[in-house]
Image (spheres, coloured by chain):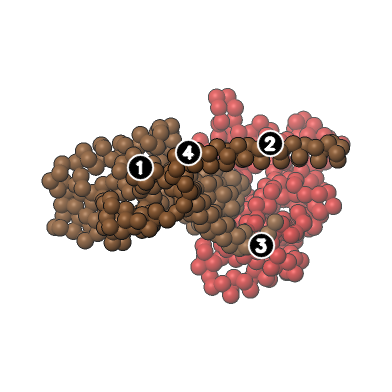
Chain colours: A brown, B red
């Protein structure tokens, strides 16, 4: 392509992009002016006047919207971080079983992956909430000497209580994501050549030792990028919390929009908080990836 | 004569009619070198890979260093064999994430539970024997193919094996790199190491072997002394194979 053609193309893209942006912004300002709401964030410091079922820090209805949003963010973080850990453990277990030699375990894990991956997450969340927890009797279903109890209120474990909404979301997200993580891990393991397995076996190393010392270190660089994208999906999927009534940041945003009509500001808050969270996940994984690559000084 | 390898009627079938191994029997005595030759797909790799349990078989019996293995492939026995038998592969199969010295000391430290310092010392000795001790702290990808294969031989020797298996050790090498590896194997033969070598290198086979076993379609066609095999092979099939190798 000639240089002046390139410049013309770039210019064209530039005009189209900013033209579209202009139309959207104009549309927004005209509509805001028409409804008389305006664009500002001062409402953030007014009392929220709604109650939250779940709050890791103290919260009453006289606290501000900003505080309510922060509580929502903490709730989101709580379910995302715990699902991330549970999904990784489950996914690793299923992935190893799937890649392993035991044909029964292989079949079971293949069936698990197929069923979980081919059904919508929303349905799975509903299932865990309505069938898994609300289906339990309201009098304590399982109780062990006041240490551990399971009921339709959730799980209580030596003073710690987990609501059924939180648990349904935790289980749903973890199980759904674990099926994808399992496939990522299996792919990573299969990317290591057969010769590496034969080499450690021929040296008399046990399957477990060989897997940990030879196969896994070589599989990890192939696993990390896929794992990162599954973690990002998990974080974004956590907004389905609203389906089971868990007060995550999206659900609280939704309530605030209904009360104040501040849809644009609320969505900006929402987008920015997810952007920050996912940047945090991506960067943490990037650091992890660099550490691994640093430990393999070859190639 | 103490036999190190005894194979009796080894048979392995893949699908109906196709046999990777067809009634293979052989004996290798201590200190002897058996060279296995044959066209590709004749089952020679499959055969030596059964010796350390990398390949299974359906019928017959193996006796390696007095440890008997049948078609049930008892894992504990195979594990015992692997600790006393070294193997060198066509594609080297070095561990790319470990340094050359770590490649060599892995098994002594984690299988034989030797101290790291002791394993390092013996590892360095083996590397100097192979003439590559200056590469000890490099990684496999930084070495040439011939050097990598000599590391693989040192790795196989680190467990002080009583039998060494070579599966086409020079087939993946550049022609000018073949001799450095063959010389290392010749040296081992002179030291009295018991070996089974799958190779296409005729002059090397003449030098090093006490016996040549020729295979085709999973069957042993003939087992002869190298003097006889290379000058006046008993079977028409063997002579045809050697003629074709000569033309290269």
Q: In front: mark 4 or mark 3?
A: 4
Is residue B155 toward the left or the right of residue A100 in the image?
Answer: right
**Residues at discs 3 and 1 both on one chain:** yes
Q: Which quadrant is the N terminus of chain B positioned in? A: bottom right
Q: Chain of mark 4?
A: A
**Residue A297, which numbered label?**
3
User: Dot 3 falls on which chain?
Assistant: A
Q: Is residue B188 left or right of residue A125?
A: right
Which class describes the residues within 10 Å of circle 3: few (<14), some (14-19), or many (20+)? some
Q: Which label's residue is closer to the chain start, 4 or 3?
A: 4
What residue is disc 1 on?
A258
- Which is more N-terminal, label 1 or label 4? 4
Q: Are marks 3 and 2 in contact (CB under 8 Å)?
A: no
Count of marks overlaid on the render: 4
To which residue does mark 2 refer?
A: A16
Give the answer, above or below, for where A119 lies relative to A58.
above
Question: Where is residue B242, by image quadrant?
Answer: top right
Residue assigned mark 4:
A34
- The answer for how far apart the CA atoms under marks 4 and 3 are is 63 Å
Quick one: label 3 or label 1, which is nearer the N terminus?
Answer: 1
Q: Give the Cα separation between the discs numbered 3 and 2.
A: 47 Å
Nearer mark to the viewer, of 3 and 1: 1
Residue at (39, 43) in percent of width and height = A261
Q: Nearer the viewer, residue B128 or A63?
A: A63
Q: Is residue B4 left or right of residue B128?
A: left
Q: Secondary structure at mark 2?
A: helix
- The answer as to whether the residues below labels 4 and 2 share one chain is yes
Q: Nearer the viewer, mark 3 or mark 2?
A: 2
* Secondary element at image label 3: loop
């Amino acid at each position: 392509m000639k240089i002046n053609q390139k410049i013309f193309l770039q210019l064209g893209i530039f005009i189209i992009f900013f033209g579209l942006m202009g139309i959207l912004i104009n549309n927004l300002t005209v509509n805001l002016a028409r409804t008389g709401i305006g664009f500002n964030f001062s409402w953030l410091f007014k009392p929220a006047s709604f109650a939250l079922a779940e709050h890791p820090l103290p919260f009453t209805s006289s606290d501000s919207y900003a505080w309510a949003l922060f509580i929502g963010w903490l709730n989101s973080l709580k379910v995302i971080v715990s699902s991330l850990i549970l999904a990784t453990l489950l996914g690793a277990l299923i992935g190893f079983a799937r890649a392993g030699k035991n044909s029964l375990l292989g079949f079971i894990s293949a069936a698990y992956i197929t069923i979980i991956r081919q059904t919508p997450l929303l349905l799975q969340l509903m299932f865990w909430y309505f069938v898994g927890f609300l289906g339990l009797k309201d009098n304590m279903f399982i109780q062990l000497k006041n240490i551990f109890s399971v009921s339709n209120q959730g799980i209580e474990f030596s003073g710690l209580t987990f609501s059924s909404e939180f648990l349904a979301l935790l289980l749903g997200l973890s199980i759904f994501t674990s099926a994808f993580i399992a496939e990522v891990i299996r792919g990573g393991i299969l990317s290591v050549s057969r010769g590496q397995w034969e080499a450690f076996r021929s040296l008399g190393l046990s399957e477990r030792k060989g897997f940990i010392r030879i196969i896994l270190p070589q599989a990890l660089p192939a696993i990390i990028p896929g794992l990162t994208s599954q973690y990002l999906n998990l974080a974004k999927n956590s907004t389905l919390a609203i389906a089971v009534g868990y007060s995550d940041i999206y659900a609280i945003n939704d309530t605030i929009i209904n009360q104040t009509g501040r849809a644009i500001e609320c969505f900006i808050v929402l987008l920015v908080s997810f952007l920050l969270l996912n940047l945090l996940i991506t960067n943490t994984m990037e650091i992890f990836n660099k550490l691994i690559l640093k430990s393999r000084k070859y190639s | 004569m103490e036999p190190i390898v005894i194979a009796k009627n080894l048979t392995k079938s893949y699908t109906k009619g196709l046999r990777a191994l067809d009634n293979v029997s052989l004996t290798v005595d201590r200190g002897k070198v058996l060279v296995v030759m044959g066209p590709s797909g004749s089952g020679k790799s499959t055969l030596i890979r059964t010796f350390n349990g990398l390949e299974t078989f359906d019928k017959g019996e193996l006796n390696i260093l007095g440890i008997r293995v049948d078609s049930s492939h008892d894992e504990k026995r195979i594990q015992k064999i692997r600790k006393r038998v070294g193997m060198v592969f066509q594609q080297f199969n070095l561990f790319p994430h470990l340094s050359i010295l770590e490649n060599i000391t892995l098994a002594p430290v984690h299988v034989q539970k030797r101290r790291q310092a002791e394993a390092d010392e013996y590892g360095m000795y083996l590397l100097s024997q192979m003439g590559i001790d200056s590469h000890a702290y490099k990684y496999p990808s930084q070495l040439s193919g011939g050097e990598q294969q000599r590391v693989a031989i040192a790795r196989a020797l680190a467990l002080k094996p009583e039998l060494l298996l070579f599966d086409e050790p020079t087939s993946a090498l550049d022609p000018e790199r073949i001799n450095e590896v063959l010389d290392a194997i010749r040296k081992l033969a002179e030291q009295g190491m018991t070996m089974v070598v799958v190779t296409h290198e005729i002059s090397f086979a003449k030098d090093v072997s006490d016996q040549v076993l020729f295979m085709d379609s999973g069957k042993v066609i003939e087992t002869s002394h190298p003097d006889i095999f290379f000058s006046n092979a008993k079977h028409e099939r063997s002579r045809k194979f050697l003629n074709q190798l000569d033309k290269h």
